[in-house]
Amino acid sequence: MAGLRSGAGAPSGRRGALAAALTVLPLLLLTCCVRCAESSKPSNIIVVLADDQDVELGGMMPMKKTKALIGAAGATFVNAFTVTPLCCPSRSSILTGRYPHNHEVRNNSLTGNCSSTLWQKGPEAEAFPVYLNKQKYQTFFVGKYLNQYGKKEVGDVGHVPPGWDQWHALVGNSQYYNYTLSINGKAEKHGDSYEKDYLTDLILNRSLSFLDERSPQHPFFLMLSTPAPHSPWTAAPQYQKMFSDVQAPRNGSFNKLGKDKHWLLRQPVNPMPDSSINFLDNAYRKRWQTLLSVDDMVETLVKKLDSMKELDNTYIFYTSDNGYHTGQFSLPIDKRQLYEFDIRIPLMVRGPGIKPNQMLQAPVLNIDLAPTILDISGVNLSTVNVDGQSFLAQMAPSLRNGTVRPFFLVEYTGEGHPTTDPACPKLGPGLSQCFPDCVCEDAYNNTYACVRTLDSKNNLQYCEFADSESFVEVYNLASDPHQLENIVKKVDPTVLQAMNQRLIKLQSCVGDSCRNID
């Protein structure tokens, strides 16, 4: 809003001068107030969410522009984790700021509460966009939402989650072509034309249109949820020949036997057959190819904000829902496991008050995104039911005082098929994700909870499985960063007992008790 102008002339004499002063003073005060209000206008917020992008195995290598424009311009969190390494429960945690045991989305299935009626009536109605909307933010979503979103039995495309002013959500799981979007509750079908339909580019173009059409009187929030680098790994035409000489990293736990680990890690053939290695190398290259379009998207978005003179008043977050693996412990491709490659995620943020080129060590979780976003928007966090905590203080210490958590929880509920996979008849029921070469990545009893300790003194992980063996895995990541040795039989029993008690507390924590574990 521009300052108010006065067209009145100046009266003569002492009385006239006094009258003029009394006339002008309220106008000066009003102008000052307007300018003060403008300078304290709430910051805009943008979240770019990738799908299955690892950070441990080089997943950020293709993202040169993103690293320069967000990471180098702000803060990179080198110890960022998902609290559950799978798309739907992780995204539900991002939206609510809650652990899975509190939002009750357990896996990617409707029976696991992915975009279920229970989710819609409960946690979704309390997700952070609802609060942003109350703060007068203009909210915009485009891209993949939750894996089961748009299914007929849970509202079809007509279901638009509360809090979103503009809604352009993908029906179902990640695709690049031949998909359906819900456009504010109405179906919009797309084909296989690169210019019209390539989803990563469409996400960018719809976002640019929203920015052009928004009201300048209110701040905006955009969430751009890309399909990349999720399967089917369809790169844009101009990038399909890139990285032809790249292969999956061969170091660490690559092609290693899952010795002393949960039975699911002991079942792959070791060493892996050439067919599995060729498959995962091809997947690795294609994942990188898809990310080049995301990198372009970030660059265009930053340039757009700059041209609008909004860049300096906008927080931009870049992250992923979970990590990924390609050959670690002889598992060809997937996520879902408790190991670093699946639970570590990229996280970079730039914005007001954040100094450039920061490499921050304190652990942050994806359940911290919602409270951080709400903190930026001015919401009183004591009024919000979240398990996470704002990390605004870590990025910009001058804005907030913060605390670093000593422990955190990683939990996952396995998925399986009740019948035997016809392609792998020797394996029996209860398994899933058995490809390539009938190597299964998940099972009903691949259900676990871990307590992770990461500070200057300890770098430990303690995990318990809900299976017939009551299997336990313990790792000292300070001396064994690739988690090659399960040291459960070597650790002092008092340490195991302490970790077990912390895990019990974390598995039942709610809100404050999740942030204050002794």
Image: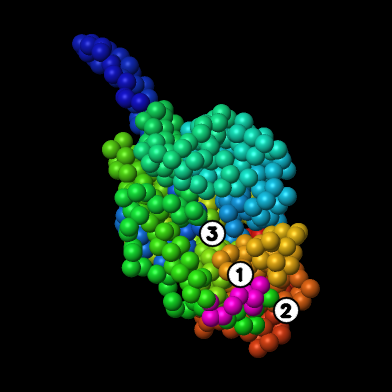
399 relative to 81, above or below? above
Give how far across and how far down residue 349 sits, in percent: 41, 54
Identify the residue under disc 2: 497
Q: Which mark is residue 329?
A: none
Q: Label 2's element?
A: helix
Distance from the alpha carbon under mark 2 to that under mark 1: 34 Å
Residue 438 position within the rendered picture, expressed as x and y whole percent measured from the top left: 61, 68
| Rendering quarter of residue 310 | top left
Q: Is residue 467 above or below residue 350?
A: below
Q: Which residue is mark 1?
A: 439
Mark 1 or mark 2, which is nearer the start of the sequence?
1
CA separation in Å, label 3 and label 1: 21 Å
Task: Name the kind of residue labelled 2 in the image.
Answer: Gln
Start-end of magenta stretch: 264-272
Which mark, residue 322? 3
Report the amino acid beneath label 1: Val
Mark 2 crowdedness (10 Å alpha carbons): few <14, some 14-19, many ≥20: few
Tell me the residue at 72%/76% (across/down).
471
Nearer the observer, 12 or 237: 237
Q: Regarding mark 3 in the picture, which secondary structure is present there?
A: loop
State left or right for residue 116 relative to residue 63.
right
Give me the residue at 69% from left, 64% from top. Answer: 431
